[in-house]
Image (spheres, grey):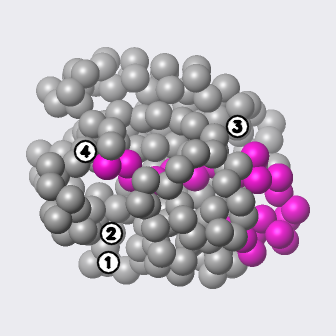
Amino acid sequence: MLLFVGLGNIGKVYSGNRHNVGFMVIDAIARDNACAGFRPRFQGKLGEITLAGERVLLLKPETYMNESGRSVGEAVRFFKIDVANVVVFHDELDLAPGKVRVKTGGGNAGHNGLKSLSAHIGNGYRRVRLGIGHPGDKDLVHNYVLGDFAKSEIARVEALCLAISANAELLAKGEDEAFQNKIHHAMETAGYGKDGLF
């Protein structure tokens, strides 16, 4: 069993924020992989799908970003999920828009959602880092991540969510490098170059 977690903030006001790209990815995976729907559990919304013959739980914590670990910790303990089988989708300032990198463990780079997760379940979970770019000044970061994707960015975000959903099976099989390569290829095929733009 695996647990796929999308990080974000609940409520309509946050739904289009760059900080909520993790939720957007989980919604795309659910939509494209026959998820019967989400129900309230573990201080979040929980769904379930099957990928590569594996049972995969989909969780969107509703504790707000800074307390994401409380929701994830409850699910991990209830289902006795190994932390290595927790895959977390989150926004990443240090990657160009549309870029994706997967890694296990490591630092949290000031991401409060990851800090909370590490405090509740340890640091050995897998992170799918979803590039949103950096505003260029650390004083602008707060408003940038809590700002909506610009209209010009929406098509790229949708292409990214589609590519991740189409290749999520590779994550379920633990083929993280192959997954990264497939996303890179899919984004280039969709017309997004190395700078993440058309």
Q: Is residue 71 left or right of residue 93?
A: right
Q: Residue at x 37, y 80 (%)?
A: 11
Residue type for callout 3: Ala
The circle drawn on residue 133 is 4
Q: Which residue is mark 2?
A: 15
Contact flag, marks 2 and 1 (Cβ < 8 Å):
yes
Compute the Cα span from label 2 to label 3: 26 Å
Query: Which segment did they paint magenta?
Result: 72-93
Q: Which residue is mark 3?
A: 172
Residue 104 visible? The answer is yes
Mark 3 burial class by Cα count in 10 Å: few <14, some 14-19, many 20+: many
Query: In the displayed structure, would residue 177 be above or below residue 86?
Result: above
Q: Is residue 144 left or right of residue 89?
A: left
Which numbered disc, 4 or 1, marks the residue closer to the eye?
A: 4
Contact flag, marks 1 and 3 (Cβ < 8 Å):
no
Mark 4 burial class by Cα count in 10 Å: few <14, some 14-19, many 20+: many
Question: Where, quadrant-wise, is the C terminus in this rendering?
Answer: top left
Q: Which residue is mark 1?
A: 12
Of residues 145 and 61, the one nearer the viewer is: 145
